[in-house]
Image (tube, rainbow, N blue to C red):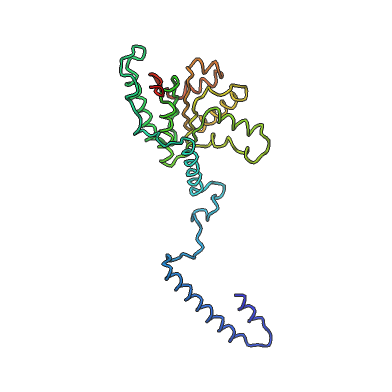
Amino acid sequence: MTQLMASALRQGEDPSQAIAQIRDRNLALQREREWILEAGEFEEGYLDDAPVCTKCGGLGYVGSQMCSCLRELCRQEQKKELTSLLGSGRETFDSFRLDVYPDAYDPKLGASPRQLMKSNFNICRRYAQSFGPGSGSLLFSGATGLGKTFLSACIARQVADRGYSVVYETAIRLFSDFEAEKFGGAAEENRGKSRKYLDCDLLIIDDLGTEMTTQFTVSMLYHLLNTRMMENRATIISTNLADTEIENRYNPQIASRIIGTFRLVQFAGEDIRRR
């Protein structure tokens, strides 16, 4: 194109001959490119400049709305983060073992710990298999070492594999991120740290009650639970705290939202890590 314009603007010369030479050279280059592509066995359209997404043209947004391509990319990144956090990859429903729970009848439970855990296992598996918008929230309650973390990790993996955004975090780390964003200044790494906890399809908070309880953490927990409840987003909480301990440690408003709206999944038995 540059050569064509130069020939057309050159004064005192007939540009037709120069233009014909440029055209022949252009056609020869096109044929050479076709031969190279054919010899290299490249697909048709290999050199075409096509956007990665036809909906948004590769921008990631359609107007002010996030495009499905960027949303899927965010989900894949969250799955990588989830995998790195959970680690071993052995937390699956297929690897859950009921035989580590006592089979003897417990009058306090009205069943054996194994029967109770079989029921819990079925609840968790159905929850993960049917998870979708509007799925309810779960409260895993029981002593240390009874499988709460394991089953919540099983749910996290399966729900993430089905394409939903899942954030799995310990209570200590979660509140640490809120504090860093609030008091850590304007550093780039502190910006938007808490946003993922509010926006994800499923939030799993592990070991609630192990964090240092302050006025700030209580305020942030209320904000988090209330926001997710108002936006109809699912949350799973695992804790060693009983109902009365939740109310005493936090406040009646938080206890009401957890005990009143979460489905209780009670864990029982002996510490399976020791067994």
Residue 212: x, y in percent? 58, 22
Nearest the viewer among 137 and 265 is 265
Q: Is residue 159 above or below residue 245?
A: below
Q: Which picture quadrant has residue 175?
A: top right
Q: Look at the image and tell me in which quarter the C terminus lies.
A: top left
Which residue is at the far top?
107
Question: Could you tell me which residue is drawn at 46 percent across and 36 percent down?
Answer: 87
Q: Is residue 166 left or right of residue 192?
A: left
Residue 165: x, y in percent? 47, 39
Residue 240: x, y in percent? 47, 20
Residue 185: x, y in percent? 68, 35
Question: Could you tell me which residue is drawn at 65 percent across and 79 percent down?
Answer: 6
Nearest the viewer among 122 and 132 is 122
Q: Is residue 260 above or below residue 188?
A: above
Q: Look at the image and tell me in which quarter the N terminus lies.
A: bottom right
Which residue is at the far front?
274
Question: Could you tell me which residue is drawn at 32 percent across and 17 percent down?
Answer: 112
Total marks shown come to 0
Q: Is residue 192 above or below residue 266?
A: below
Q: Is residue 54 above or below residue 189?
A: below
